[in-house]
Amino acid sequence: MSIREDVSTPRRTKEIIQRHGFSFKKSLGQNFLIDQNILGKIVAAAGLDDTKGALEIGPGIGALTEKLAQEAGKVTAVEIDQRLLPILEEVLEPYSHVNVIHGDVLKLDLQALFAAEFGGVNGVSVVANLPYYVTTPILMKLLEEKLPLEHIVVMIQKEVAERMAAAPGGKDYGSLSIAVQYYSVPELICTVPHSVFIPQPNVESAVIRLTVRKTPAVAVKDEAFFFEVVQSSFAQRRKTISNNLKSRFFPKEGRERLEQLLEEAGIQPTRRAETLSLDEFAKLSDTLLNAGLKELRV
């Protein structure tokens, strides 16, 4: 059988798995995609061409990697499971512009990786079918390290994708929405049924594209404090923003001061965090910072 056949068909995937005696590790969240239509949508959403690079996280047996290799000028894939390395070497043998790195993306120096792997390319996108149990840590690492990225196009749990793209006022909107939207512009590309994976996951999936902003969505005086205020505001969703922030900054006394500061920021103390926009959180964060509350938190 030619290794140039598409890996992403059910028959080809099963043949590779059986021939290599590969067994899935639940602890690594391994679910291989076996639908060429979905793979095509993922790759198309990244807007790749032969001048651009792609970083893939968790390539599995190379179904998506193969598609990326046909579109991008340079592809680097990071795989944590050493058992998959010989399979990837076999599948990707025709593509000299693909490099597979054995490692944990959460532990890698991504700035150094980008400098070593993508020098000279005209923009890089992350394109991946992410293990669902580490989706948020991986995405936040990619965004917080301010890498030179154009897009992040990933298959993730549908519920998490909806939270990332949520607008203020709904049940899905929360601190994750704000963190993702601070750094990027999220867009749901498509939903994905269970049946296009081996093995089939227990949750619904979706493809989301994050277009990485050149500068954050809002300007804040202290980014770390901004996110601390956001997290504290959502500590208990059913509580008002005033009560959540009081628990964080004024456990015993001086609470009337916080309500004055909320009013100063143009925010009614009785509102809940899910109703505040990024702009409002930015203004609130800077108001609290100017009032010295960074030193008062507990």
Image (cartoon, grey):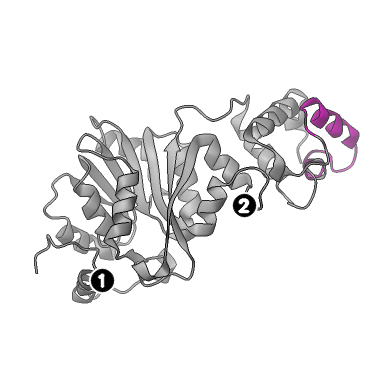
Residue 266 seen: yes
Query: Is residue 34 shown above or below 102?
Result: below
- The kind of residue tagged 2 is Asp
Q: Amino acid at mark 1?
A: Pro
Write down the residue under mark 2: 172
Residue denoted by label 1: 10
Q: Earlier in the sequence, mark 1 or mark 2?
A: 1
Instruction: Where is residue 61? Give x, y as percent.
Output: 25, 62
Direction from residue 234 to residue 270 in the image, left or right? right
In terms of secondary structure, where does tag 2 sit?
loop
Q: Position of residue 196 (x, y in %)?
A: 35, 67
**Secondary structure under the numbered disc 1 in the rendered image:** helix
Q: Is residue 266 magenta?
A: yes
Q: Which residues are magenta?
A: 244-267
Instruction: Please give left or right for residue 30 compared with residue 293 in the image.
Output: left
Q: Residue at x 69, y 27 (%)?
A: 283
> Could you tell me what secondary structure mostly forms the magenta stretch?
helix
